[in-house]
Image (tube, grey):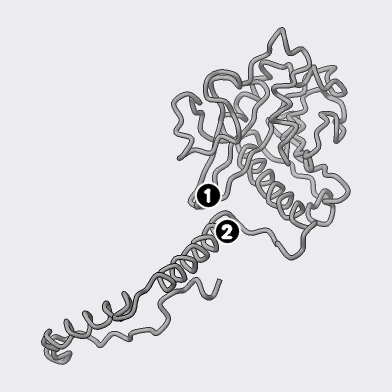
Amino acid sequence: MPPYDTHKIGVVFVGAGQVNNEVAILSNEYGSNRYAAFLTGLGKLIHLKDCDSDQIFLGGLDQYGDDGEFTYCWHDDIMQAIFHIATLMPNRESDRGCCNKKRHIGNDFVMVVYNDSGEEYKLGTIKGQFNFVEVIIKPLDYECNLVTLQCRKDLEGLVDTTVAKIVSDRNLPLLVRQMALHANMASLVHQYRANPSDAYASKWLARLRHIKRIRTRAQEDIQSRSTPGISLTQGHAQQNKSFQQNTPTPNPEASGQRKRLVSTVDDFTDFV
């Protein structure tokens, strides 16, 4: 259970005449120059084979070539995001339907669609059970882009699809990444709606709660195994008391140091 939130985002390129063709979209091995520049701004290019999966969240990508050699990832202090990019995944003669690519992209909550077809892209063109939100990029003239959101009806209360953004090529990766991450968080919250008693918690909060449960079990186990006589906690307290009695008390006025206030609360997790 990592101490940071994890997100996986699908990315596809739609070329001319492909707007209604799922297999054609997934089969693309490259896109336009502006699309390539957009990818470089999404995050850091990583070599899957050289990644330590304990340190870098890969979102199910195979490290030994089945899902390609490279992809892009991004992280900050509290989260990591991996991008499942169709144009960086290999095509195979034995997989004309691109099922291997769809295995990842079709199971992502959020998909970024770089629509360079000149036609309107419709939600659900790439079919998947978990594709809740799609961030649609429509490249315009003068190095500008129109960015809109489409989502399933059951997410309309969590995702605002009425806002359209005009953004430059330079700022496009930053905006799209933020929109995709926010949409993915909304999708995670939506997933937990089925069980109201188990509200969505971030990975670090879930980790903290799990640590508290382990601590409680450990304390109960120590108490159940304690023998008559001095317990571990009593022995530790007596040692501290004896040490404090043998240690001369410094004069705070002579040392110029302020007295420290000792809090009786030793575990801030009680408030979580």
Q: Residue 140, how many percent across, how many down?
A: 76, 30
Residue topped by disc 1: 1
Q: Is residue 103 above or below residue 197?
A: above
Residue topped by disc 2: 206
Q: Residue at point 60% right, 56% down?
A: 202
Judged left or right of residue 4, residue 17 is right
The amino acid pointed to by label 1 is Met
* Residue found at the far top of this picture: 93
The one nearer the camera, 91 or 36, is 91
Residues under labels 1 and 2: Cα distance? 8 Å
The one nearer the camera, 41 or 98, is 98
Q: Quadrant of the C terminus?
A: bottom right
Few, some or many residues within 10 Å of mark 2 (<14, 14–19, 20+): some
Q: Secondary structure at mark 1?
A: loop
Give residue 228's quadrant in the image.
Answer: bottom left
Q: Earlier in the sequence, mark 1 or mark 2?
A: 1
The one nearer the camera, 2 or 216, is 216
Few, some or many residues within 10 Å of mark 1 (<14, 14–19, 20+): few
Judged left or right of residue 190, residue 206 is left
Q: Residue 13, how many percent across, how many down?
A: 73, 24
For the residues bearing labels 1 and 2, Cβ distance under 8 angstroms: yes
Q: Residue at point 72% right, 17% down?
A: 28
Q: Is residue 217 above or below residue 173?
A: below
Q: Secondary structure at mark 2?
A: helix
Q: Which label is found at residue 269?
A: none
Q: Residue at point 60% right, 33% down?
A: 60
Q: Residue 65, how many percent across, how many down?
A: 55, 18
